[in-house]
Image (spheres, helix red, strand yellow):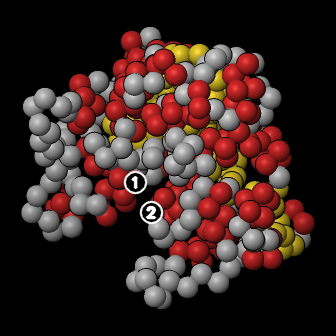
């Protein structure tokens, strides 16, 4: 099967709607298909990656922990809009420290999350074969 | 690329987010409530600029349904569903700003 | 060209399914192949065989069924995500049996399958277009 570049475009906050959770479910399945997968987080989508989510008070599952597992499935390209963070008073330090282990570099732990400008995001987007929006 | 926007810019920021991330060769198609941004008074200067370059389209059926066919801003090209299909075919990867 | 479609919203509440249907119909009329329509999120509700819209309104479910989108083996390529469907009470006979539920509601023009079908549609098709809210 040919390899394509898939981008998952996440623009919604978690919990208020199901899009974030069900997007993550697609990404977990996508891991089995050996495609080039990247995740983009823009607008309120950046809240999906914020550290310290606690859903005890709302009776819903805290699925943010699942993001930590994606590195093990070679899903390690998380692009977060710098402008979206800034608009919301957030910075890279507020995000979960997601990592992956690079087998070509003696299993060195490397960060999966990259904060990029909208211009960089637009360039990444234009390289994709498929863009799935949630 | 083809970017589709289906939200009024009075209700959501989808159009602005799309405009922030659009590259120099992509086109925008306004569909559903997105066509509200094609009406004169709802136009952003950046959208108008892209329209001047012939890069903004709107779905005729959605314009007509909302009664704004006389208010469509200059240079926005109207297409039917067949035209939508052609845009998808001609412009490569489609991005939906849902 | 091979085109696939992802639909994220149910019928009637949002225009997404109507727009996608008009798009699919136009694509087929132009000689393109709709490889697969994948129903996700509340989009799974488009597959209910129990919808009863007023007579003067369009029937979204039947509209989809009328496109008769099938693969070479004759299976429907109107595909409903199983995980999203089960969550929302959309079951075919097999899932109803498996889960001990005494009824099923998937229209025969649709089939339930896994999320892998969405990824596969992206791989196999020249284009994938998402319709949502």
| Pointer 2 residue | A18
C114 versus C122 height, above or below:
below
Instruction: Determine whether, in the image, residue B26 is placed left or right of residue C118.
Output: right
Report if residue C99 is visible in the image: yes
Outermost residue toward the bottom?
A56
Outermost residue toward the top?
C30
A49 versus C85 height, above or below:
below
Instruction: Determine whether, in the image, residue A77 is placed left or right of residue A44.
Output: right
Residue occupying image coordinates x 70% and y 17%: B54
| Pointer 1 residue | C41
* Quadrant of the image containing the N terminus of chain B: top right
Numbered disc 2: secondary structure: loop
- Of the pair B17 and B39, the residue shown nearer to us: B39
Counting from the top left corner in percent of width and height, residue B91 is at 65, 23
Mark 1 touches mark 2? (CB < 8 Å): yes
- For marks 1 and 2, give the CA distance: 7 Å
Instruction: Determine whether, in the image, residue A59 is placed left or right of residue A19.
Output: left
Q: How packed is label 2: few (under 14 Cα within 10 Å), some, or many (20 or more)?
A: some
- Of the pair B89 and C101, the residue shown nearer to us: B89
Residue occupying image coordinates x 29% and y 24%: C67
Counting from the top left corner in percent of width and height, residue B6 is at 51, 38
How many dots with numbers?
Answer: 2
- Of the pair B43 and C46, the residue shown nearer to us: B43
Q: Which mark is residue A42?
A: none
Counting from the top left corner in percent of width and height, residue B22 is at 73, 37
Q: What is the chain identity of the residue bearing mark 2?
A: A
């Amino acid at each position: 099967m040919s390899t394509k570049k898939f981008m998952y475009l996440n623009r919604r906050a978690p919990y208020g709607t199901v899009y974030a959770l069900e997007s993550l479910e697609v990404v977990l399945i996508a891991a089995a298909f050996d495609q080039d997968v990247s995740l983009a987080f823009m607008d309120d989508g950046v809240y999906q990656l914020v550290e310290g989510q606690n859903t005890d008070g709302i009776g819903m599952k805290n699925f943010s922990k699942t993001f930590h597992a994606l590195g093990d499935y070679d899903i390690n390209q998380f692009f977060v809009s710098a402008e979206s963070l800034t608009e919301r008073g957030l910075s890279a330090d507020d995000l979960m420290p997601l990592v992956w282990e690079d087998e070509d570099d003696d299993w060195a732990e490397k960060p999966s999350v990259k904060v990029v400008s909208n211009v960089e995001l637009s360039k990444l987007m234009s390289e994709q074969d498929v863009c799935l929006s949630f | 690329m083809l970017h589709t926007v289906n939200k009024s810019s009075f209700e959501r920021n989808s159009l602005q987010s799309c405009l922030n991330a659009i590259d120099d060769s992509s086109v925008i198609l306004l569909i559903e409530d997105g066509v509200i941004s094609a009406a004169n008074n709802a136009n952003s200067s950046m959208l108008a600029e892209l329209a001047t370059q012939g890069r903004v389209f709107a779905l005729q059926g959605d314009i007509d349904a909302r009664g704004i066919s006389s208010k469509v801003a200059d240079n926005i090209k109207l297409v039917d569903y067949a035209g939508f299909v052609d845009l998808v075919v001609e412009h490569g990867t489609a991005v939906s700003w849902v | 060209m091979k085109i696939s479609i992802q639909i994220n919203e149910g019928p009637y509440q949002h225009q997404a399914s109507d727009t996608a249907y008009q798009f699919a119909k136009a694509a087929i009329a132009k000689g393109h192949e709709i490889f697969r329509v994948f129903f996700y999120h509340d989009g799974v509700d488009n597959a209910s065989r129990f919808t009863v819209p007023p007579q003067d309104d369009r029937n979204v479910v039947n509209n989809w069924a009328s496109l008769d989108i099938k693969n070479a083996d004759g299976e429907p390529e109107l595909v409903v995500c199983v995980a999203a469907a089960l969550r929302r009470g959309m079951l075919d006979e097999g899932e109803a049996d498996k889960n001990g539920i005494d009824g099923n509601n998937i229209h025969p023009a649709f089939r339930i399958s896994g999320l892998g079908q969405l990824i596969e549609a992206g791989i196999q098709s020249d284009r994938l277009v998402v319709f949502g809210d």
